[in-house]
Amino acid sequence: MAITTTQPRTGRTPRFRRISALGIATTGAAALALTLVPTSAQAAAPAAKSAGATQAATAGTSYPDNLDGWIRESLDIMKAKGIPGTYDGLYRNIMRESSGNPNAQNNTDVNAQNGTPSKGLLQVIQPTFAAYHVEGTSQNLTDPVANITAAANYAADRYGSIDNVDSAY
């Protein structure tokens, strides 16, 4: 026989709400603090198609040396490598992270305090860039196309697509 009670539970809902609000605030702070930091599991699965596909994707195509051109070149490389993402998703994240400045560097966040500042259009740290670098792009972290494709590769691994990123990642 089951025993039931009609007394209301006390303390659980307000405590749960406090924990939920704290969890949301903590999660947001952690996301900001851990901008593009790979775990060993995430670093093990970057896109792995051939450099030939990247070169073929951009061969004979001329891209302007500006934000629009960098995004379009990155999208062609991403398509060849099977990395999801759209122009709008890349543009939105670039504008939030660097305002379109390929030489942007964050010298104040926890990454910078730990000696690894976030750099470039999508504010990538060097370990993440190394783990998610897309073959066939520059090894230079602040190269706009390399920065975009590495960040999109990371975001695809972590969030399914750069399009799913709506805040610091």
Image: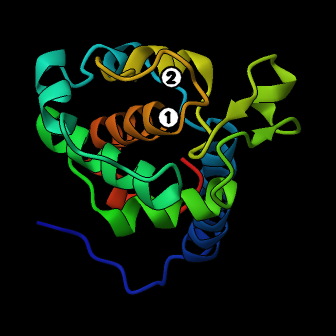
The quadrant of the picture occupied by the N terminus is: bottom left
Asked which quadrant contains residue 20, the reply is: bottom right
Q: Residues within 10 Å of mark 1 (few under 14, many from 20)?
A: many
Relative to 121, is 116 on the left or the right?
right
Which residue sits at x=32%, y=23%? 134
Q: Nearer the viewer, residue 104 or 20?
A: 104
Amino acid found under the numbered disc labelled 1: Asn
- Residue 17 versus residue 118 in the image, above or below: below
Q: Tell me whether circle 1 and circle 2 mark residues in contact (CB < 8 Å).
A: no
Front tag of 1 and 2? 1
Q: Nearer the viewer, residue 129 or 169?
A: 129
Please say whether residue 39 is visible from this viewpoint: yes
Relative to 127, is 106 on the left or the right?
right
Amino acid found under the numbered disc labelled 2: Thr
Please say whether residue 166 is visible from this viewpoint: no
Which residue sits at x=21%, y=37%? 58
Q: Residue beneath label 2, please?
A: 128
Q: Earlier in the sequence, mark 1 or mark 2?
A: 2
User: How far apart are the alpha carbons under marks 1 and 2?
Assistant: 10 Å
Checking the image for residue 19, the label placed there is none
Residue 13 place in picture, x, y as percent? 55, 75
Q: Residue beneath label 1, please?
A: 147
Image label count: 2
Residue 36 place in picture, x, y as percent? 54, 34
Relative to 150, is 49 on the left or the right?
left
Which residue sits at x=56%, y=45%? 122
- Residue 104 versus residue 112 in the image, above or below: below
Q: Classify mark 2: helix, strand or loop.
A: helix
Q: Nearer the viewer, residue 138 or 115?
A: 138
Residue 141 place in picture, x, y as percent? 57, 24
Q: Residues within 10 Å of mark 2 (few under 14, many from 20)?
A: many
